[in-house]
Image (spheres, rainbow, N blue to C red):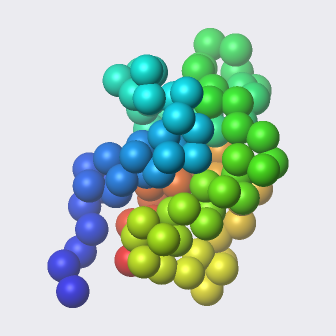
Amino acid sequence: MVALTEDTAFHGVVEVLIEVRPDLAEHRDRITRDTGLFYGEDPSRPALELDSMDALELLSALERHFALELSDTGVRVVDLRTVGDVVDAIVRAV
């Protein structure tokens, strides 16, 4: 099995985010590892403003996209605050 690079994981996560929230496609180039998933705790950092249903859809779509079961890895939604957190979780899980 070939290891998943952070760059490949990042681009996959962005694609999945856009699948879950198509309105993010027009802002694709502004999504970075530091982008918050939910409402921003820090107003200076952009956030995608996902809600709880988006978060559940995101986890399900990530599992399909990367062919893995996140529940088997100990990944918890509460631990995923930024796009980078998601990328790191995916890289560790693969």
The answer to which quarter of the image holds residue 76 is bottom right
Query: What residue appears at the point 42 percent right and 77 percent down from the top-left corner?
Result: 67
Image vertical order of residue 72 relative to residue 61, above or below? below
Q: Which x, y percent locates residue 36?
A: 61, 34
From this viewpoint, which residue is outermost toward the right? Answer: 52
Q: Which x, y percent locates residue 53?
A: 78, 50
Q: How many numbered marks, from 0 up? A: 0
Query: What residue appears at the point 32 percent right and 47 percent down from the top-left corner?
Result: 11
- Taking the image as shown, residue 54 lies to the left or right of residue 21, namely right
Query: What residue appears at the point 59 percent right and 75 percent down from the top-left corner?
Result: 70
Image vertical order of residue 79 relative to residue 64, above or below? above
Q: Which x, y percent locates residue 5?
A: 25, 61
- Taking the image as shown, residue 68 lies to the left or right of residue 55, namely left
User: Where's the C terminus, which quadrant?
Assistant: bottom left
Whether residue 40 is visible: yes
Query: What residue appears at the point 70 percent right and 30 percent down from the top-left corner?
Result: 49
From this viewpoint, which residue is outermost toward the top? Answer: 44
